[in-house]
Image (cartoon, coloured by chain):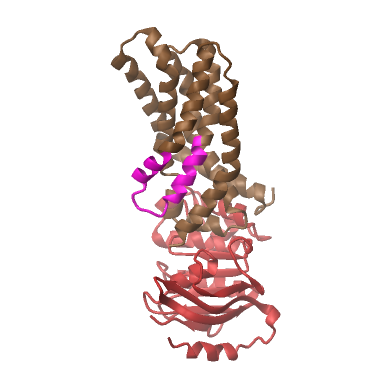
Chain colours: A brown, B red
Amino acid sequence: MTPGSTPAACAVLLRRDLVLAWRRRGDIAMPVLYALIVATLFPFALGPEPALLARIAGGVVFVTVLLAVLLSLDHLFRGDIEDGSMEQLMLAPQPLALLVGMKVLAHWITSALPLIVVAPLLAGMLKLPGQATPVLILALLIATPLLSLLGAVLVALTAGSRRSGMLLALMLLPLCVPVVIFAAGAVAAAQEGLPWAAPIAWLGAGLVMALVLAPLACAAALRIAMDS
Amino acid sequence: MDNGVFARNNRRMPSADPSAIILEARGLCFLREDEPVFGPLDFALCAGEIALVEGDNGSGKTTLMRVLTGMLRPGEGEVRLDGATFSLDTMAGAVVFLGHQLGLKLDLSPRENLRVSSGLYGQREGVDADLALAEVGLAGFEDEPVRRLSAGQKKRAALARLLIVPARVWLLDEPYANLDREGIALVNRLLEGHAQRGGAALVTSHGAVRFAGGEPRRIRLHA
């Protein structure tokens, strides 16, 4: 790959973010640990009845994973803005939307993928029936990138303000709701032996739309944030 | 606002060939809450020319730089690059900017940081990361995390980017800050080499700086 070409730029940025995440491995482990703790506490709080746990398992795993992803979302662009790397990205010849997309991809790989890997364990701890587990994984594989993309837009929008954590949580809530409804709906349907393709398809449609629009919105929001 | 110095300078510009003008500002002005920060400014940078932006603290040097990179929108006037109106979308890596924030990742080594820069902006022929780092005096520190380098060494690591990236216009905001006497000579050497290759550079500084190759053109901002 020639340096400076678009594929080279994407590869180099993705690699940079993955290397940075690897050098701070503790930060990757944090959301996983959080999800494990929350999922462990539920049976203690609600009692160990398998029927009850199986009923709530899908929902609990989703909410836990989504919240764990949100934990790390706030830092998505902050480091780059603070050390001037964002300026370098904006002035690079490649479209900023593409570069931002790479950053979101790196964030998904480092924060959501480990959670998806441990999700079957969480589901098992909560007695989710075996036939629903593949649907759970599939729903997570579609829902988490969708959430990362939506979250990235909001992080970019709040990047200019100093204490953006609260604002981010408030703004993200309404966007999370449909994602959780469709994802948990698919798992519930699979649990009862009903067809579950429709909610998954809705999530997929949402993901495709977000893949196209979110990086553009992110780039525009970051330009505004840097314009001050 | 007194721009007399400037206008006169402009008329006396040595190069009459307008095709050699790389970066040009016309009536450039930046307003913050309707108060002018600087301007209106008119100047042109030709190939092989280095200009020094002078002004006191708060006179808008950094703001001017950010407007010239396209990150800030000018209140009035325009910036032209190679005769075309310039925006972030069209300039395609022709400009490299070195600001107060150096754009280095502290957890990466200087070499890894350079690899990111060359991946994004392209790599000049015949230069590689090790060569560029040796040139700025960081030989032996290539694999040290930037976090462990001193402020001056960080600055040098950022300066190495100028060597490796093929951009024709350099916008350097306070490149001399944190550098020792030898580092200042290094910046001057880099600028001289850049001018000889036909590049243009705009440098801000509030200190008096002497270039080895004669007096640079001066652009004065008034607070």
Q: Position of residue B83 (x, y in %)?
A: 66, 74
Q: Is residue A54 above or below residue B215?
A: above
Which one is nearer the viewer's eye here, B190 or B6? Answer: B6
Q: Main secondary structure of the magenta part?
A: helix
> Magenta part of the protein: which range?
A147-172
Question: Does B70 sit left or right of B46 as displayed?
Answer: left
Q: Is residue B125 above or below residue B218?
A: above
Outermost left residue:
A45
Can residue A107 be seen here? no
Magenta residue check for A159: yes
Which one is nearer the viewer's eye here, B172 or B184? Answer: B172
Q: Residue at x 54, y 61 (%)?
A: B160
Can residue A32 be seen here? yes
Q: Residue at x 46, y 62 (%)?
A: A227
Give the quadrant of the C terminus of chain B: bottom left
Q: How many marks?
A: 0
Q: Position of residue B142 (x, y in %)?
A: 51, 52
Q: Position of residue B172 (x, y in %)?
A: 50, 69
Magenta residue check for B111: no
Q: Is residue B75 above or below residue B90?
A: below
Give the quadrant of the N terminus of chain B: bottom left
Q: Residue at x 69, y 51 (%)?
A: A2
Q: Position of residue A79 (x, y in %)?
A: 43, 49
Q: Residue at x 48, y 58 (%)?
A: A224
Residue A68, by quadrant, is top left
